[in-house]
Image (cartoon, helix red, strand yellow):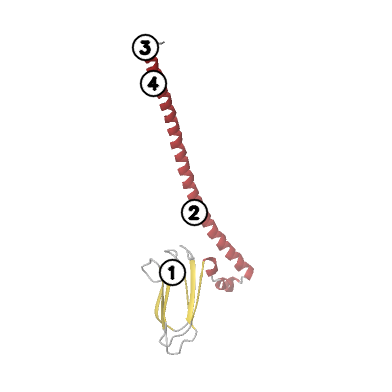
Amino acid sequence: MVGKDMFVHITFHFIDLLENEAFSAYIIEEGASKYIYNEGTITNEVSVSFTSIEGPSVIFCVRAPHSGGHLNFSIKFGADARDYSIIAKSTHLDPVDARIQNVLDELSSFHKAQLIGASFIDKTSEKAIQTYHLLARFAIANSVFMIFSTMCYIFYFRHFFRSKKLI
């Protein structure tokens, strides 16, 4: 699932597109007001990379040429979407370095999820502490009430028995 602030890479083209024909396509995030990609006459392979802003879904729509055809389409997101071939050409990275970079991306995503989880745990523990203090105040107030009511009963019955001359 494509998440918020996630790198996305989409590649597509028609396999059997005739020479004089073109197709159109657009890509937009659900809830967004601007297109990520919008082209009316496409004749070659298209490769689009972007970072998702809105969140969980990306809408991809293609209008086929009049003759029809077969669409070849791939979508990658997260750590899989990085194009390490550009890095490899400039710095001559080997596959191990690319894999390490992929692992670092996954660990970064995991760390981000851990921070979000920790903030939820902090909020929950804060609520638990507030509830504990509320229950402690209630218990103290209940104890004071019981002591006060017991003293009232003692005073009342002592006065009652003295008036009847039983004590």
Secondary structure beneath disc 2?
A: helix
Q: Is residue 78 above or below residue 159?
A: below
The amino acid beneath tag 4 is Cys
The answer to whether residue 16 is visible is yes
The structure residue drawn at horizontal position 58% and vertical position 65%, both measured from the top left corner, is 102
Residue type at tag 1: Val
Comes first in the chain, label 4 or label 1: 1
Judging by the rendered image, the residue that carries numbered circle 4 is 152
Q: Which residue is mark 2?
A: 116
x, y percentage for residue 151? 41, 20
Which one is earlier in the sequence, the residue at label 3 or at label 2?
2
Front in this rendered view, residue 106 or 163: 163
Q: Nearer the viewer, residue 70 or 107?
A: 70
Amino acid type at mark 3: Lys
Helix, strand or loop under label 1:
strand
Of marks 1 and 3, the one in the foreground: 3
Can you give x and y, in whole percent of width and height, for residue 71 in the image? 48, 81
Residue at numbered disc 3: 164
What residue is rendered at 43% in x and 24% in y? 147
Could you say which quadrant of the image residue 22 lies in?
A: bottom left
* Picture quadrant of residue 134: top left
Disc 1 from disc 3: Cα separation: 88 Å
In the depicted structure, whether residue 111 falls above or below residue 66: above
Q: Earlier in the sequence, mark 4 or mark 2?
A: 2
Q: State which tag comes first along the sequence, 1 or 3.
A: 1
The location of residue 93, given as percent across then percent down, is: 61, 70
Which three-letter amino acid code belongs to the residue tagged 2? Ile
Check if mark 4's residue and mark 2's residue have beta carbons within 8 Å: no
